[in-house]
Amino acid sequence: DAGITQSPRHKVTETGTPVTLRCHQTENHRYMYWYRQDPGHGLRLIHYSYGVKDTDKGEVSDGYSVSRSKTEDFLLTLESATSSQTSVYFCAISDPNSGVHEQYFGPGTRLTVT
Amino acid sequence: DQQVKQNSPSLSVQEGRISILNCDYTNSMFDYFLWYKKYPAEGPTFLISISSIKDKNEDGRFTVFLNKSAKHLSLHIVPSQPGDSAVYFCAAGSGNTGKLIFGQGTTLQVKP
């Protein structure tokens, strides 16, 4: 299994509070991604990163920001959490330059915004 | 618009029989496709992939078929086992962006 951890694994927070989710990898892969999984929608890309300090928006980026100051860490921040951001969040890594396109996923963080 | 669609939310199959999961896409620029399997409370795990230049790829009990003219791919699991019960996602990508577009998922139940 790829070395990907996510923290916290579960979090309950109140509407309007800031939340930061952390993804940590030990595979030295350049590319990292944040997804959310919701019933009926599958996995939707929030933000991704091509390298340190190099990030871009995905299809559902509103209300989220990311930072990547080190190769191994990719942080997802909800500046002011809303109930619509209640979801399961997955981090993934890949190394497309190796010719391999598969992404490897972390175990997920279940976030509940009350 | 959903570029990758899995129109069957669920599928139930008897152990030992074939499971066929389907996926349709709209973007002809996709040049690789992947299938992922997901158990509850775990992250998705990669199963099998196929390049757009091929029409079939096989790995053990899993075979993926690609029909580019119909913009359709399918995953065949033969024989199905109870441990295959999970949610299956198809995904598509292009170039070296690494970005994948996922379908909504199909829940497979394999009955003993």
Image (tube, rainbow, N blue to C red):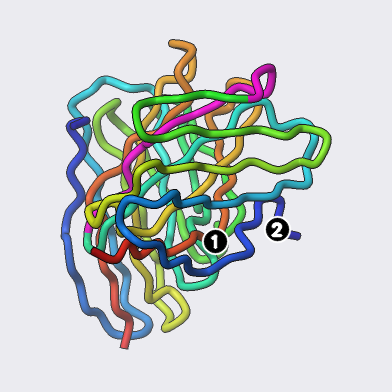
Q: Which residues are magenta?
A: B42-55
Q: Quadrant of the C terminus of chain A?
A: bottom left
Residue B25 appears at what percent x and percent y?
Answer: 72, 47
Q: Residue at x 32, y 70 (%)?
A: A18
Q: CA distance from mark 2 to mark 1?
A: 9 Å
Residue A26 appears at what percent x and percent y?
Answer: 18, 26
Q: Residue at x 51, y 42 (%)?
A: B75
Q: Residue at x 24, y 30 (%)?
A: A72
Residue A23 appears at what percent x and percent y?
Answer: 25, 44
- Point out which mark residue B104 bears: 1
Magenta-drawn stretch contains B51: yes
- Point out which mark residue B2 bears: 2
Side of A69 relative to A102 (left or right):
left
Report which quarter residue B99 is drawn in. top right
Q: Secondary structure at mark 2?
A: loop
Which kind of residue does numbered mark 1 sit on?
Answer: Gln
Discs 2, 1 touching: Cβ within 8 Å: yes
Residue found farthest to the bottom? A114
Q: Is residue A56 above or below residue A101?
A: below
Q: Quadrant of the N terminus of chain A?
A: top left
Residue A107 appears at what percent x and percent y?
Answer: 22, 51
